């Protein structure tokens, strides 16, 4: 990949296409990769699906740390500000995610108080959100981001209107969850019923009696057996294969059932906003409903006062690191991006991570499958510089409330 950050505006989707495309264009795999790369240029995640509390425990962020992270929906990067780092540089190959994160930063700077910020990102059916955008947020946006949110979607609606049309029902993931709800209702099951559970025993009973039987339906099993069916989860063809491999004989229905079971039953609903997103398609209405750390009232002043320490650019994380001096990065967050990568891309990335790693640096990432994907794929001399914290990784994975990944992985630079 090019290492020239200044060229990011030449073709907004070019980097994403390069990251995804592996096969000849007119092969079945190539067509699948093309479709995914086109879809992934739109909004995918209105909320990131990695648990920021697990991230922050693993990263052990201290004042003065310099963090490089993949942005996605931005919930985690903004939450890291609570720990008082010196700088957070977020990147994303999806240009819409860049616009989405720049809007969040402008909302932090421009909205008058916590109540208006909470309404903008939690009560996303409130028409006052669009007026708040016009008065307070729009003036704080850069020109290209303002043009994006003022622009119209293919339906003819202004994009900013999704903030009063249930934000979290939008994006590829939001539409995928909505599709799942509609299919469930066709079989007489309403996933929202889980949210009526008052104990974890009631959560378990609802899942076993209402949700689990859906995965035995022939149509559902056939549908999720197609790679394209999970594009709405942001899962490209390469990651689909890794995810399917986590189940017996590559049975995707069994894998997804297990992940959804953990999401529904593994944590109390009072603590797990990921379950509210999956089963309720938004955050809870109660004053004590669970929320990402950056959206909690007690964290607002810290996040707001430090928002200028975060930037977001439409480049790959390898490109960004290639521009940095040696020993200049303390923490790196890769999300699940390595599941997409070829061996060449992985080695290029880890050369830059290792070159720029400051003493005591840490790296975290997630994988669709359980195992650490780096051994045997990344040069052994590079990996020898890093200590894979296997026991910590397993313990942290067990506490990850999002529940959709097979593994959480923490590496620390050796002395």
Image (cartoon, grey):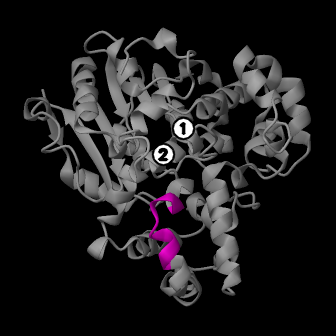
Dot 2, crowdedness within 10 Å: few (<14), some or many (≥20)?
Answer: many
Which residues are the magenta region?
221-229
**Where residue 29 appears, x then y in whole percent?**
40, 51
**Where residue 102 appears, x then y in whole percent?**
65, 26
Q: CA distance from mark 1 to mark 2?
A: 7 Å
Is residue 351 or residue 219 the one in the foreground? 219
Name the residue tied to disc 2: 52
Please tell me whether residue 134 is drawn above or below residue 247 in the rendered image. Answer: above
Name which residue lies at 60% across and 54% down.
173
Q: For numbered disc 1, what is the local secondary structure?
A: helix
Q: Main secondary structure of the magenta part?
A: helix
Name which residue lies at 28% across and 48% down.
409
Please tell me whether residue 136 is drawn above or below residue 78 in the rendered image. Answer: above
Question: Quick check: 414 left or right of 362?
Answer: left
**Where residue 141 appears, x then y in whole percent?**
74, 19
Q: Which image quarter is the N terminus in?
A: top left
Dot 1, crowdedness within 10 Å: few (<14), some or many (≥20)?
Answer: many
> Can residue 194 be spotted in the picture?
yes
Name the residue tied to disc 1: 79
Is residue 200 or residue 279 the one in the foreground? 279
> Can residue 191 be spotted in the picture?
no
């Amino acid at each position: 990949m090019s290492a020239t950050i200044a060229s990011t505006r030449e073709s907004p989707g070019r980097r994403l296409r390069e990251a995804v495309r592996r096969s000849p264009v007119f092969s079945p795999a190539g067509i699948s990769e093309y479709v995914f790369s086109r879809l992934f240029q739109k909004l995918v995640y209105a909320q990131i699906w990695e648990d920021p509390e697990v991230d922050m425990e693993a990263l052990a962020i201290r004042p003065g740390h310099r963090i490089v992270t993949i942005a996605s929906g931005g919930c985690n990067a903004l939450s890291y500000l609570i720990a008082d780092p010196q700088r957070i540089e977020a990147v994303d190959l999806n240009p819409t995610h860049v616009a989405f994160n720049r809007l969040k930063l402008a909302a932090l700077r421009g909205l008058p108080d916590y109540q208006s910020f909470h309404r903008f990102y939690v009560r996303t059916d409130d028409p006052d959100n669009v007026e708040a955008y016009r008065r307070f947020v729009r003036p704080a946006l850069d020109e290209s981001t303002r043009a994006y949110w003022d622009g119209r979607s293919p339906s003819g609606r202004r994009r900013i209107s999704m903030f009063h049309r249930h934000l979290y029902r939008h994006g590829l993931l939001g539409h995928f969850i909505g599709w799942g709800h509609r299919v469930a209702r066709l079989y007489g099951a309403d996933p929202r019923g889980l949210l009526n559970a008052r104990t974890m025993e009631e959560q378990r009973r609802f899942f076993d009696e209402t949700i689990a039987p859906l995965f035995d339906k022939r149509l559902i099993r056939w549908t999720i057996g197609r790679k394209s069916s999970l594009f709405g989860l942001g899962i490209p063809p390469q990651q689909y294969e890794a995810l399917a491999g986590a189940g017996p004989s590559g049975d995707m229905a069994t894998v997804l059932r297990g992940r959804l079971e953990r999401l529904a039953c593994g944590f109390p609903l009072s603590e797990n906003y990921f379950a509210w997103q999956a089963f309720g398609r938004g955050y809870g209405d109660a004053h004590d409903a669970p929320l990402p750390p950056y959206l909690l009232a007690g964290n607002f002043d810290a996040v707001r006062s430090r928002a200028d320490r975060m930037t977001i650019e439409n480049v790959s994380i390898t490109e960004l690191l290639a521009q940095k001096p040696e020993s200049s990065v303390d923490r790196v967050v890769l999300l699940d991006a390595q599941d997409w990568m070829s061996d060449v891309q992985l080695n290029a990335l880890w050369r830059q991570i290792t070159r720029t790693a400051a003493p005591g640096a840490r790296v975290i990432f997630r994988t669709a499958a359980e195992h650490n994907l780096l051994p045997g794929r990344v040069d052994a001399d590079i990996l020898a510089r890093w200590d894979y914290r296997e026991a910590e990784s397993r313990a942290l994975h067990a506490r990850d409330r999002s529940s959709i990944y097979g593994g959480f992985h923490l590496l620390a630079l050796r002395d």
